[in-house]
Image (cartoon, rainbow, N blue to C red):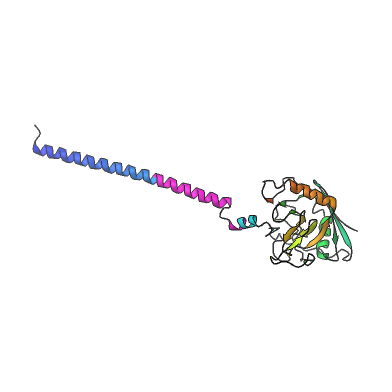
Amino acid sequence: MVTNDQRRRQLAREKYERQQQRRAEARQKSRRRAAVIGAAVAVVVATLVGLVVGGVFDKDKKDEAADPAANPSAAPTPQQSPSPAMAIDDKAKYTFGLKTSAGDITFEMDAAKTPQTVNSFKSLADKNYFDNTKCHRLVTSGIFVLQCGDPQGTGSGGPGYNIPDENLDALGKANEQGQVIYPAGTVAMANTGQPGSGGSQFFLVYKDSPLAPTYTPFGKIDAAGLKAVEEVAKGGTADGGQDGPPKTPVTIEKGTVTKN
């Protein structure tokens, strides 16, 4: 026979066991909630990291892609070296001949209008600077250019010195948008967007392009060369975008500058 005292102890024990079970269940639920919340936070963090790495929050990258005319060259200033001494006839005309994988491209340069530019290109070509280099950039919307002259093939290379802007009024007065038309066939210096920041990179205009008159125009492509560039442009960019490496690779096999 169970006494009253034994009965009370049994009831107290059962009550204690029920409390412990409820506490254990509460702790288990709390751990499950924490795990779910932690997983959700991890997903959000991973998504945000992916967006940042992918450039969604990179305003500068987005703006540049939206406006391909904003910066025909994003090349930083390379390690500095002395600019070449003047060694050309500044009253003569010179021809820049490019033997490329896409065909020969030739254009005439007038030293009377762009003496510093012509002198620099003559000096670089005489040192085989342009040989076996790639035309690294094709733009197919807004402006229409093939950009070359970077020995690294990345858009960040240069000769280690800068040359002054020249002949900037050659294409007429800027319109209300601050632009002039660089006609198809024009060859002009690329730069970083800052005055006097040209190096060795240049762009070949294959279709009339509106740009600010801040890029030294220094040559005119011959008919055969313009046709070769147009064929490259028809292939578009490697990734199908409006600004990037050309799908049809263009390598300058040999670059020479000769006096006419």
Quarter occupied by residue 171: bottom right
Q: Magenta region, mostly helix, strand or loop?
A: helix
Towards the viewer: 77 or 62? 62
**Quadrant assignment for the C terminus:** bottom right
Q: Is residue 90 left or right of residue 212?
A: right
Q: Is residue 34 left or right of residue 181?
A: left
- Residue located farthest toward the right when viewing the structure as drawn: 260
Q: Which residues, given as a range, are shown in magenta?
A: 35-61
Q: Is residue 38 magenta?
A: yes
The answer to whether residue 252 of the structure is visible from this angle is no
Q: Which x, y percent locates residue 124?
A: 81, 57
Q: Is residue 79 left or right of residue 106?
A: left
Q: Residue at x 78, y 50 (%)?
A: 229
Towards the viewer: 85 or 229? 229
Q: Which x, y percent locates residue 156?
A: 70, 56
The answer to whether residue 38 of the structure is visible from this angle is yes
Q: Which x, y percent locates residue 40?
A: 44, 47
Quarter occupied by residue 161: bottom right
Q: Is residue 7 magenta?
A: no
